[in-house]
Image (tube, rainbow, N blue to C red):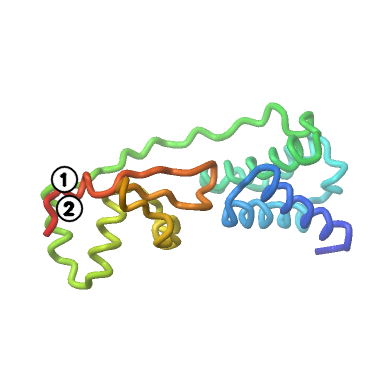
Amino acid sequence: MENIEDERILEDFKNFLTVDRQLGERTVERHILELKRLFENAKFNPLNATKSDIRNYLMMFKEVPANSYANILKTLRIFYRDYLGRLEVVEGFKFPTRPFNAIAIPSKRKLQEFYRWLKEPMAKALFLIYVTTGLRRNEALNLRIGDIDFEKRMIIPKGTPRGLKELGLLSTTMRLKMP
């Protein structure tokens, strides 16, 4: 970072994302990295940016994948519109259209076949957590015994961004008839 003021702003923005916006740790890290890139590469003072400055900055990323461009724009919108209260700087910039990629969901038979190939009990347990709850990798790996309500057969993960997910347990397992 170039100066102490930039570092102070980054730290305050990080606190804003964590406290005010209630974003998860990895999301906050991604926004901070994007903002650092802006501070390091912009040919203008980011705090005094105009819409034209942001347009020229975004031109550097026109050839990146649509999802990457959208992530850059998300950071800029949160920083200028929500943190600095300068909507006019980012107003009107559109997110790129992203192609729809249909996800092929494995059949019940394929899931059972995959499960039979698993040898380690831990791998089988983790697979069943994934297939019965829909948790993401980090959510599943960060589960603690206290997150499971055995009486209600529910998983209630703590610290899930955007509120709690309450997930029924074992109903899918029973339908899949996993050994």
Residue 47, percent from left and from top:
85, 45
Q: Which residue is painted at 34% across and 47% down in the image?
A: 154
How many numbered marks, from 0 up?
A: 2
Location of residue 54 (image quadrant): top right
Q: Mark 2 — residue?
A: 111
Residue type at mark 2 is: Leu
Front residue of this view, candidates 18 and 85: 18
Residue 107: mark in rendering:
1
Task: Determine whether the residue tagged by mark 2 lies in a helix, strand or loop.
Answer: helix
Q: Which residue is painted at 30% across and 55% down in the image?
A: 129
Front residue of this view, candidates 137 and 144: 144
Q: Is residue 50 left or right of residue 134?
A: right
Quote the CA–CA distance across marks 1 and 2.
6 Å
Residue type at mark 1 is: Ser
Location of residue 82 (image quadrant): top right
Residue lying furthest top in this view? 92
Q: Which residue is painted at 31% across and 53% down in the image?
A: 150
In the rendered view of the protein, which quadrant contains the N terminus? bottom right
The answer to whether marks 1 and 2 mark residues whose Cβ atoms lie closer than 8 Å is yes
Residue 167, percent from left and from top:
35, 44
Q: Is residue 153 left or right of residue 164?
A: left
Q: Residues within 10 Å of mark 1 (few under 14, many from 20)?
A: few
Q: Residues within 10 Å of mark 2 (few under 14, many from 20)?
A: some
Front residue of this view, candidates 140 and 2: 140
Residue 53: mark in rendering:
none
Q: Which residue is painted at 88% across and 57% down in the image?
A: 5
Residue 20, percent from left and from top:
70, 43
Task: Determine whether the residue tagged by mark 1 lies in a helix, strand or loop.
Answer: loop
Q: In the rendered image of this protein, does residue 129 appear above or below residue 107?
A: below
